[in-house]
Image: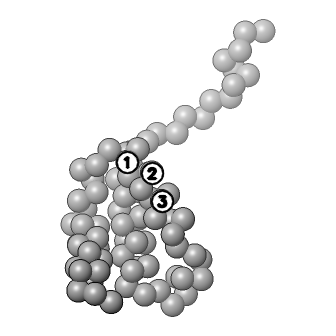
Amino acid sequence: MSTQTKKAMKTRLQKAMNNEYANELSFTNIDRSIELAKEIKIYDLIDADGNTINKVAEIINRLQNAEFQLLDINIKDLMYE
């Protein structure tokens, strides 16, 4: 693994540990989390390497900072009878 790759992984983990993803928009955090999650296979978590651990740390921190409130709305309640 190149030194540049190690530095990039360290930076990603450091950003997550420092809660730096809180500075990004919620939509950005959710979209990026989905992109990263698609790169990880479930079995990668069993014996996770540094790259996988860093991606998971970024996903968790991004989702912790995505502020949305889901509304429980029944569409029938909105329709006129």
Find disc 2 in the rendering and name its residue.
31
Find disc 1 in the rendering and name its residue.
28
Find disc 3 in the rendering and name its residue.
35
- Secondary structure under tag 3 reads helix
Q: Marks 2 and 3, Cα distance to the nearest angstrom?
A: 6 Å
Q: Is residue 75 left or right of residue 2?
A: right
Q: Is residue 17 visible?
A: no
Q: Position of residue 40 (x, y in %)?
A: 52, 73
- Secondary structure under tag 1 reads helix
Dot 3 alpha-carbon crowd within 10 angstroms: few under 14, some 14 to 19, many 20 or more: few
- Secondary structure under tag 2 reads helix
The amino acid at mark 1 is Thr
Q: Marks 2 and 1, Cα distance to the nearest angstrom?
A: 5 Å
The quadrant in which residue 42 appears is: bottom right
Colour approach in the figure: one colour
Q: Residue at x 43, y 42 (%)?
A: 68
Q: Is residue 42 visible?
A: yes
